[in-house]
Image (cartoon, rainbow, N blue to C red):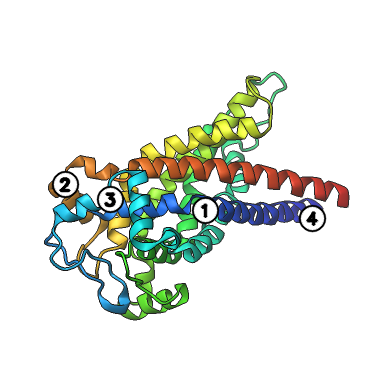
Amino acid sequence: MAETSSTLVNGMFNVATAAAAGCMADFATFPLDTAKVRLQIQGVPAAVPVQLAGVSGHLHMPAGAGASAARAQYEGLVGTIATIVRQEGVRSLYNGLSAGLQRQCAFVSVRLGMYESTKDFYQGLIDGDRPKRATEVPSMNVASRVLAGLTTGGMAVLFAQPTDLVKVRFQAAPPGTKPYPSTLAAYRSIAGAEGFFGLWKGLAPNVARNSIVNVSEIVCYDLVKDALLMHGVMNDGVPLHFSSAVVAGFCATVVASPVDVVKTRYMNAQPGEYRSALEVATRMASNEGLAAFYKGFTPSFCRLVSWNIAMWITYEQLKGVVRRMREVDV
C-alpha cells in the first residue's frame, strides 16, 4: 500500500514539474513559435478566401492580396520577427501566449509527466515474469520507450487540442487584427460558430504530429542521455542535459515539420475549406511542391532546439530540487 502511495506521489510531482518546466520554456521561445506559424501559413493560393471572418477568427490574407504578396511578406526567421515587430509591435510576438501556457499545462504535464510511469508499465509487460540475471548486459529498452512516447503524446493532445487551436489562430492573425477579445472568448466563439467539437479541429494531424514529436523528442533525449551516461562520456549534469536536448530538438524538427505545417494550415482554415488534413497535404503538394512541407523549418528548428534546452534543463533542475526537498522531509 505504501509503495502504491509513493508511486502516486512521485507521479503527481512529475506531472507538476513537467507543467512548470513546459510553461517556462514556452514563454522563453514563444516569439520563435509565432514566426514559425506565420511562415507556415503564408503563400496559400489566392483562390483561398483572405479575410477575417468576423468573430469566428478564421484568418485569411486581406482581400485583393495574391499569393505572391503573401509569399513575400515574411522571409527567414530574423526577417519574419523583424517584420512582425515593425508592423505590429513587440507584443504581437506573444499573441496567443495565454493559450500557449494553458497548452503546456495540459500537454507537457501528460506527455512528459506521465512518460516514466508509462515506460515502466510497458517494460513490465515486455519483461513479464522473466527474472533478470546479474550478468545480463544493460538494455536501452527502446521498445518500451517508443511505446510510452506514442501513448503519452497521443493522450496529451486530447487534453490540449482546444488550447493549441486558439494559440495558432492568435499567432496567425494578420497585422492590426485581433481574432478574439480574449482566450476565453476564443473558446466560446469557436464552440458557438463551429460546434463544440470545432475546438478539436485538426485533432488527427495533431495526434500524429505530437506522437511523432514525443518519440523523436522525449524518447531521443532519454536514449541519448542514458547512452552518454552508460558509456561514461559525460556525467549527470547541465552539460549532459544540454547536449541531449540539442539532439532531441533536431530529431523532432526533421521528423515532425511536414505534419506540423499541415496541422497549422488545417487549424487556421475556415469551415468547409478542407474536408480533411489529407486534403490539405494533397493541395500543398500540388500547388506549392514538396518543399512547402518544410516551410518555417529554420524557426521551427530554432524554436524546438531552444525549447528543448530550456525545458529539459529546467525540468531536470526542478526534479533535483523536489527530490532534495522530499529527502529532507523524510
Q: Identity of the amino acid at label 4?
A: Met
Q: CA distance from mark 1 to mark 4?
A: 38 Å
Within 10 Å of the Cα at label 2, are there few (<14), some (14-19), or many (20+) other Cα atoms? some
- Per the model, the C-alpha gap separating discs 4 and 3 is 58 Å
Q: Secondary structure at mark 4?
A: loop
In the image, taking residue 235 as reference, residue 287 lies left or right, namely left
The label on residue 26 is 1
Q: Quadrant of residue 232?
A: top right
For the residue marked with disc 1, what is the amino acid? Answer: Asp
User: Of 99 and 87, which appears nearest the observer?
Assistant: 87
Q: Badge 3 is on which residue?
A: 74
Q: What residue lies at 73% left-to-right and 55% top-to-bottom? A: 9
Residue that protrudes farthest toward the front in the picture: 86
Which is more foreground, mark 4 or mark 3?
3
In this picture, is 303 found above or below 16? above
Q: Position of residue 215 (x, y in %)?
A: 47, 41
Q: Is residue 223 left or right of residue 67?
A: right
- Mark toward the start of the polypeptide (2 vs 1): 1
Q: Which quadrant of the rendered structure holds the N terminus? A: bottom right
Instruction: Between label 4 and label 2, give the one nearer the viewer.
Output: 2
Observer able to see residue 330? no
Closest to the camera, between mark 1 and mark 3, is 3
- Residue type at mark 2: give it: Glu
Q: Which residue is mark 4?
A: 1
Q: Earlier in the sequence, mark 4 or mark 2?
A: 4
Q: Would you identify the image quadrant in which residue 91 lies?
A: bottom left
Rendered position, 1 above or below 232: below
Q: Which mark is residue 288?
A: 2
Give whichever of discs 3 and 2 has the lower sequence position. Answer: 3
**Residue 315 point in image, percent of width and height:** 63, 46
